[in-house]
Image (cartoon, helix red, strand yellow):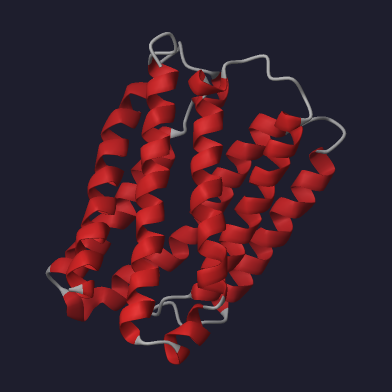
Amino acid sequence: MTQIISQIVFNSQCFVALLSFIISLRLVNNKNIPGYMKGFYWYSTIALVVAIPLFLTDNFFRPYRGYSRILNNLSLIFHYSFLSIFIIRVIVKKHNIKYLSFLFVFFLLLLIFVLVNNNLTKQLNLAFSVSNLGLTFFCIIYYYQLFNNIPTLDLRKEPSFWIITGIFFCMSAHIPITAMGDLLNHKIPLAVYSTLRTILTFCYVVMHLFFIKAYLCAIHPRKA
């Protein structure tokens, strides 16, 4: 039963990623969207590219799951870099650009180091932890600036708020489980561990739903 639920949630993630990609295409060459949203459709595009082989190998070609995991692990470099740079573009100020750049490079190099020194055909919990922690730090900086300044925009209609909130929800939820993933895998029952992994997958579903909300806010700012 646990495996069936896990499969349903994973397939839902792939479906929502596809839906997010389709809606994101409305941002292409759209001159009416906020400047920081231009090009964000690339994230949904790459997410779908990575999701397709994962979906196929998980549902139909399980003996080849190792190959899709290689792609998934390597995609963390894009995932971390793209979303970090997006957040930096939203929060950057002249006095903190050096600090943000140092933070970005530090986690990027640490992520690459972990990937290079591990078997890419396996689920690399440590690599996910590094990526998640780095993105969580950037989200916290965004919220710190937001709460220390009176918002001049309606956050309900602000695409960046929905995107960063989606990132923060997903990444922060992942940190404790991915950080202890290898330990938990050997210390708790398999059914419990699978349930935790399913919860993490569901977090990605929520993140893509937040991205869809952001796309709709960008495309129809008055109707959001």
The answer to whether residue 143 is above or below residue 213 is below
Q: Residue at x 38, y 78 (%)?
A: 193
69 with respect to 64 (left or right): right
Q: Residue at x 47, y 16 (%)?
A: 33
Residue 127 location (% of width, % of height): 54, 70
Residue 166 location (% of width, % of height): 49, 42
Which residue lies most toward the top here?
Answer: 222
Point out the image quarter for the N terminus: bottom left
The answer to whether residue 8 is above or below residue 14 is below
Q: Quadrant of residue 59?
A: bottom left
Q: How many marks?
A: 0
Q: Residue at x 58, y 60 (%)?
A: 131
Q: Quadrant of residue 98?
A: top right
Point out the image quarter for the C terminus: top left
Which residue lies most toward the left here?
Answer: 60
Which residue lies most toward the right here?
Answer: 95
The answer to whether residue 165 is above or below residue 134 is above
Residue 140 location (% of width, % of height): 69, 45
Q: Nearer the viewer, residue 163 or 6?
A: 6
Camera sees residue 28: no
Residue 61 location (% of width, % of height): 15, 73
Q: Residue at x 41, y 62 (%)?
A: 200
The answer to whether residue 81 is above or below residue 120 is above
48 with respect to 58 (left or right): right
Camera sees residue 55: yes
